[in-house]
Amino acid sequence: MALALLAAVILQTLLPDQFVLHPRYVLPAVELVALFALVIGHPERMSRRTRGIRIASQLLLGLIAVNTAISVGLLVHRITTGGQIRPLELLVGGAEIWLTNAIVFGLWYWEYDRGGPASRALGLADTPDLLFPQMTDPGLAKDWEPIVLDYFFVAYTNSTAFSPTDTLPLSRWAKVLFMLQSAISLVTVALIAARAVNILPSS
């Protein structure tokens, strides 16, 4: 989880100036400090994760999500108002925003599926919010538990296909997040593609 959060912060730091809130390094700096504090205070075993640690991780994730939403808004504003964007900035910035969005939603799924990682580790919730294909196989379901990478895969494929692929949302909150993620990804990709047609050099 810490590596995923760090990757999201780094991606936000590398965004072109047009797609960030200025002064540009304030929010990433706050996120890095919060991440460092979270890593220092994180228990060794996820099953012993305290309520305070979970609230802190959710606040950090929320801050990254807000920063990403701002970048999406600035990207949409630039494209729809005809602002000057160099092709490389458009493609690289759009890809960074898209990937950060997938990381953020993957961590949201990881944070809330079956009550969170500690609840899953202790087996406190039997009803899943996300149905992974391994859960439908009696030979795998007994000993298999999803990790952060599995949730990122769900978010990545949802952003790519604009719909669930192999993992199905079962709870209402999961369905809402799936719809929201797909909508953000669709708008981002569609606007970038439409603008790229006009600004990329033709042969």
Image (cartoon, grey):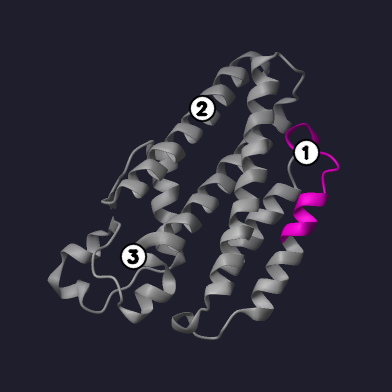
From the image, tell me which residue sits under label 2: 187
From the viewer's perspective, is residue 80 above or below residue 53?
above
Mark carried by residue 81: none
From the image, tell me which residue sits under label 1: 21
Q: Quadrant of the C terminus?
A: top right
User: Dot 2: few (<14), some (14–19), or many (≥20) neighbours within 10 Å?
Assistant: few
Residue 144 as seen in the image, left or right of residue 102 = left
Q: Which of marks 3 and 2 is nearer the N terminus?
A: 3
Task: Look at 47% across and 30% down and name the residue there.
Answer: 186
Residue 128 colored in magenta in the image: no
Q: How far from the left and from the top, in percent, is residue 172?
A: 31, 46
From the viewer's perspective, is residue 163 above or below residue 36?
above
Q: How far from the left and from the top, in percent, is residue 150?
A: 40, 62
Amino acid type, label 3: Arg
Which secondary structure, mark 2?
A: helix
Tags 1 and 3 in contact by the CB under 8 Å rule?
no
Q: How far from the left and from the top, in percent, is residue 184?
A: 50, 34
User: Dot 3: few (<14), some (14–19), or many (≥20) neighbours within 10 Å?
Assistant: many
From the viewer's perspective, is residue 102 above or below residue 111?
above
Q: Give the range drawn in magenta.
A: 16-31
Q: Earlier in the sequence, mark 2 or mark 1?
A: 1
